[in-house]
Image (cartoon, rainbow, N blue to C red):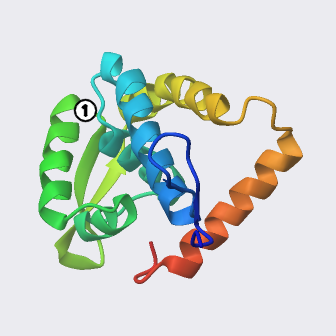
């Protein structure tokens, strides 16, 4: 008997079809496509994600950025240094807490983000080329709900 998340394949007898497997495969392929489309702009996927998070959330600390971009605080710190040199972000002391540095998007960061948004949107459209806007909105809501349900620390 074949387990419910596996089905016979003409190649090797069994082919994984579970949701977790498919989401993992999609993540792998999507990251490759995003790396390819962002490289001409000098951005990594993590940097694009970070700039998008700043646009959506406003100023954040390095620790908050690390959580929202799903990378370690050390990696976030290195990424912030690189993005600051590029002029995409700026760091300023938090007015309410002397030791916290708030990081925010600059005009130059907003401009590079706008340039990349169309390329990223084109990659997203490749995933579901025939999906209607209402179906896309429903899938988006379902994916957000899945992230909330699986989140351990408010990502």
Q: Which quadrant holds the N terminus?
A: bottom right
Q: Where is residue 131 in the image (x, y as percent from the top left)?
A: 81, 37
Q: Residue at x 66, y 30 (%)?
A: 125
Q: Position of residue 9 (x, y in %)?
A: 55, 47
Q: Residue at x 11, y 62 (%)?
A: 74
Q: As drawn, is 70 to the left or to the right of 130?
A: left
Q: What residue does disc 1 label?
A: 87
Q: Position of residue 117 (x, y in %)?
A: 54, 30
Which SS class for mark 1?
loop
Q: Position of residue 136 (x, y in %)?
A: 77, 46
Q: As drawn, is 53 to the left or to the right of 17?
A: left
Q: As drawn, is 124 to the left or to the right of 65?
A: right
Label 1: how many residues lie within 10 Å, few (<14), some (14-19) or many (20+)?
some
| Residue lying at the far top of the rendered structure | 40
Q: Which of 98 and 133 is in front in this view?
A: 133
Q: Examine the image and state in which quarter residue 138 appears.
A: bottom right
Q: Which of 37 and 48 is in front in this view?
A: 37
């Amino acid at each position: 008997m074949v387990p419910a998340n596996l089905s016979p394949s003409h190649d090797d007898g069994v082919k994984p079809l579970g949701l977790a497997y498919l989401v993992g495969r999609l993540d792998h392929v999507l990251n490759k496509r995003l790396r390819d489309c962002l490289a001409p702009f000098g951005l990594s996927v993590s940097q694009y994600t970070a700039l998008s998070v700043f646009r959506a959330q406003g100023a954040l600390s390095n620790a908050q950025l690390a959580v929202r971009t799903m990378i370690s605080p050390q990696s976030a710190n290195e990424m912030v240094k690189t993005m600051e040199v590029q002029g995409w972000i700026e760091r300023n002391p938090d007015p309410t807490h002397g030791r916290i540095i708030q990081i925010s998007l600059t005009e130059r960061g907003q401009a590079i983000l706008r340039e990349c948004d169309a390329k990223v949107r084109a990659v997203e459209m490749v995933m579901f080329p025939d999906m209607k806007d209402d179906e896309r909105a429903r899938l988006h809501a379902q994916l957000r709900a899945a992230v909330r349900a699986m989140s351990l620390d408010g990502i």
